[in-house]
Image (cartoon, rainbow, N blue to C red):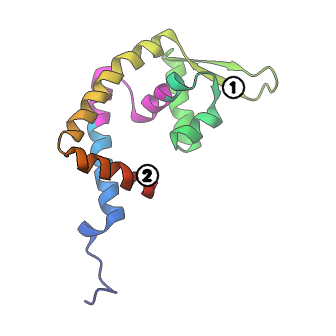
Amino acid sequence: MSDTKSLELRKFLPYRLVVLSNKIGNEIAESYESKFNLSIPEWRVIAILARHPKISAQDLGKKAAMDKVAVSRAVKNLLLENRIVRVFSDNDKRQSILSLSKQGGDIYKQVVPEARKYEDQLKSKLTEKELENLDIILEKLM
């Protein structure tokens, strides 16, 4: 086949990025699930609330780049496990404001070192120059 009609999937950038993302996500998910009983979406919610306390679920979803269903499911589970708290806005009773509970804050403090350790393992495979270039490339593609 000619180049215009064929596509070598293993060299196709979007495919490679998705495969890499899935590989990393699956490895992290196994660790967070086994050590902290946390899904990746739940971890994202906790991490965002640690940096941005008292935000709405809608704003949280935007910051997490997750769809409404994933955010809703993660929030529901975290509420059930007392890892986050929800209060309703004084201005609009339909809007809930989310924050970490003490338990959620404790989980955050435990997960961060694990997350940094995993990131360091990934980064250790690259030189300083490669890391700089990767950062530039990722910023451009984002």
State the SS at label 1. Answer: strand
Q: Position of residue 105 (x, y in %)?
A: 46, 14
Judged from this view, the residue extending furthest toward the bottom is: 2
Is residue 129 depicted above or below 98 in this figure? below
Q: Quadrant of residue 32?
A: top left
At horizontal 75% and vertical 22% (from top left) the residue drawn is: 89
Find disc 2 in the rendering and name its residue. Answer: 139
| Residue 28 located left or right of residue 54 | left
Quadrant position of the N terminus in the picture: bottom left
At horizontal 29% and vertical 82% (from top left) the residue drawn is: 6
Q: Position of residue 40 (x, y in %)?
A: 40, 34
At horizontal 19% and vertical 46% (from top left) the residue drawn is: 127
Q: Position of residue 97 (x, y in %)?
A: 66, 23
Select label 2 or label 1 by which is in front: 2
Is 35 included in the stretch rendered in magenta? yes
Q: Quadrant of residue 108?
A: top left
Q: Position of residue 23 (x, y in %)?
A: 27, 47
Is residue 88 depicted above or below 124 in this figure? above
Q: Quick one: label 2 or label 1, which is nearer the N terminus?
A: 1
Region of the chain picked out in magenta, as a range: 28-47
Find disc 1 in the rendering and name its residue. Answer: 96
Q: CA distance from mark 2 to mark 1?
A: 32 Å
Q: Closer to the camera, 67 or 20?
A: 20
